[in-house]
Image (spheres, grey):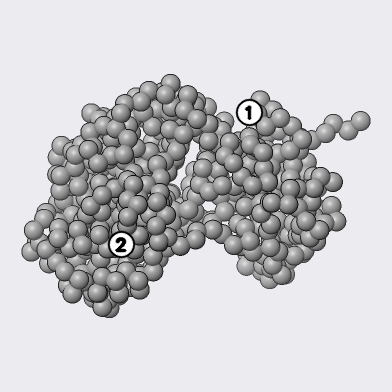
Amino acid sequence: MKPNSVAIVGAAETTELGKIPNTSQLELHCDAALNAFADAGLKASDIDGVATAGEAATAVAYHLGITPTWVDGTSVGGCSFMLHVRHAAAAINEGLCNTVLITHGESGRSQVGRGAFRRGGGSHGGQFEVPYGVMGPPTLFTLPALRYMKTYGLREEELAMVAVVQREWAARNPRASYRDPITIADVLESRMIAYPFRKLMCCLVTDGGGALILTSAERARDFPTKPVYIVGTGESVETPMISQMEDFNTSKAFRVSGQKAFAEAGITHADVDHLMIYDAFAHLPLYGLEDLGFCDRGQAASFIWERNTAPGGKLPLNTNGGGLSYMHSGMYGMYALQESVRQLRGTAPAQVDGAQISIAHGVGGMFASSGTVILTNQEG
Amino acid sequence: MPRAEPSRYMPKPTPETAPFWEGTRAGELRLQRCDYCSHVYFPPRPFCPKCSGRTVSWFNASGRGSLYSYIISHRPMPGFTPPYSIAVVELDEGPRMMTNIVECPQTPDALQLDMPVEVVFLELSNEIHLPQFRPTQVSQ
C-alpha cells in the first residue's frame, strides 16, 4: 500500500471488558461498532465497507444496518484484524469503498451466542494432532517453547519475567483485568498448565470487542480525533498445524509479515516508539522481538530481563498489559491495534511520551498466521 | 497392543490419508515420497508440497526418530490421565509429527530433547491404530 494514504478515524472497545454474561457475541461486535461510530461522529449509513472475523461479515453488516460495497471476511485467527486493516487500506485506495468498519467481538469467557469452534475429525489437524490429547491453545501454542529453551538456553525465570513486566504495564491501566504486581516467584509457583507453562504465563479468557473505522487520509482531517495513519502492513500464513512449523525457534509467518511491513513503511527499528506483540503466552513476545528484527536470535529474553520493554524502557511493549494481564477474548489482535491507536492519539492510560510510530503485530491460530500494521500520527 | 479408553476422540480418515491408517493397522508407519524430487513429507496428500508433482509413492518409514519438543499437559481430557506428554518427533526420514511419548515417566527428567524414540501403536478402535513413540529400547 501507499504509506500515509489511509487513516484510522474511529477506534473503540466495548463499553465493558472482562466478564459480560448478559451480552451475546454478535452484540459485542455491535457495541464496539457503535462506540467507534460515536468516536468518529458517524452512523451506519456512513459506512460502505465491512470487515470482520469470528462472526460472518453478512451478520455484522445486516445487524448494524450497513449496505456495503466492499466486504472482507478474512478469518485467519486472532490477527485477522491486522489483515483487515491491510486489505481495507488497499480497497480504499482502489476506490472500492470510502469508509470501512472493522469489528471484533467475542464471548470468550461467558460463551454467550457463540458458535462451535473445533477442528473436524477429517481435517489434517483432526487426524494428526487432536488424537494426542490437545486441549486448545494451552497444549498447542506452547509446544515450540522447550525447543527454543534448549537452542538458546532460555531459563524459566526469563519466561516468567515476560509476565512480570506486562503486569507492571497493566497496573497503570484501569481497564486491565489483572493489576496487582507479581514477582517471578509468583509466576513460577502458579499452577502448572502445560509444562513448562504455568498459569501466569498463559493469557486470560475474557469477553469483549473492539472496532476501527478507516478512511482516506484526505477525508481523515475532517474527523473529530487526530488521524492515525497507516504506513506499512504485512501478512502471511505458515501452517494450520503447529507440529508442522518449519522451525520451532522462529515463526516464518512473523518474519514474512514483519519484513513486508517494514519495507512498505521505509522505517528502521530505531524509529519505532511503541510496540504491541500479540501475547497469548509468555514466549510470544520473545519470538516477536526476534522475528521482527528488534533483537538478535536468542537475545529477546535478556532484552526484556534488562527492562528495555518495561515502563521507562527504550522500547515500551504491550503497554495495555497484553493478553497476559489486560484482556484476551480469543482473537486478541483487535486490542493490540486499539492500544497502538490510543498511544498515537496520546490517550493511553500508560502513555508513552511523544510516541510517533507504533507497531501492532499479531498472530493467528498457533503460529499459523500473522499480520503486522505500522501506524503513525505524523502526516505523510 | 494397548487399547485406549472408549471415551477418546477418534480421527476420521479421508480417501487421501486412508493408506496411512491402513499402515498403522498393519503395524507400519507409512510416509510419502515424491517420485520426481524425492522429497519425503507428512501429513499425507496426493501431491508433493515441494515441487507440486502429482506422482508420489507410499513407503514404510523406519519408525525411528528423535524428540523435537513437547509439553506435559496437566489439564483434564477425556481418555487421558494427566500429566501426559504431547510431543513432536522428528522422524529419521525428515518429517515431524505430533505424538505422545509413552512407556516412560511423564517428567522433564525422563523426556530429554533429542533423545531417540521409536514408534508403537495404540488401538483406539478396530479402524484406528494411533502411532505413538517411546524411548528407543536398547536391543537385548
The residue shown at (56%, 33%) is: A195
Total numbered circles: 2
Q: Secondary structure at mark 2?
A: helix
Closest to the camera, between mark 2 and mark 1, is 2
Which residue appears farthest toward the right when viewing the image?
Answer: B140
Question: What's the residue at 71%, 33% (across, down)?
Answer: B115
Q: Is residue A231 above or below residue A284?
A: below
Q: Quadrant of residue B15?
A: bottom right
Q: Which mark is residue B57?
A: none
Foreground residue among B135 and B37:
B135
> What numbered label is drawn on residue B108?
1
Q: Nearer the viewer, residue A231 or A140?
A: A140
Which residue type does callout 1 highlight?
Pro
Mark 1 Cα-neighbour bin, 10 Å: few <14, some 14–19, many ≥20: some
Q: Position of residue A192 (x, y in %)?
A: 53, 31
Question: Could you tell me the amino acid type at mark 2?
Answer: Glu
Residue A27 has which mark?
2
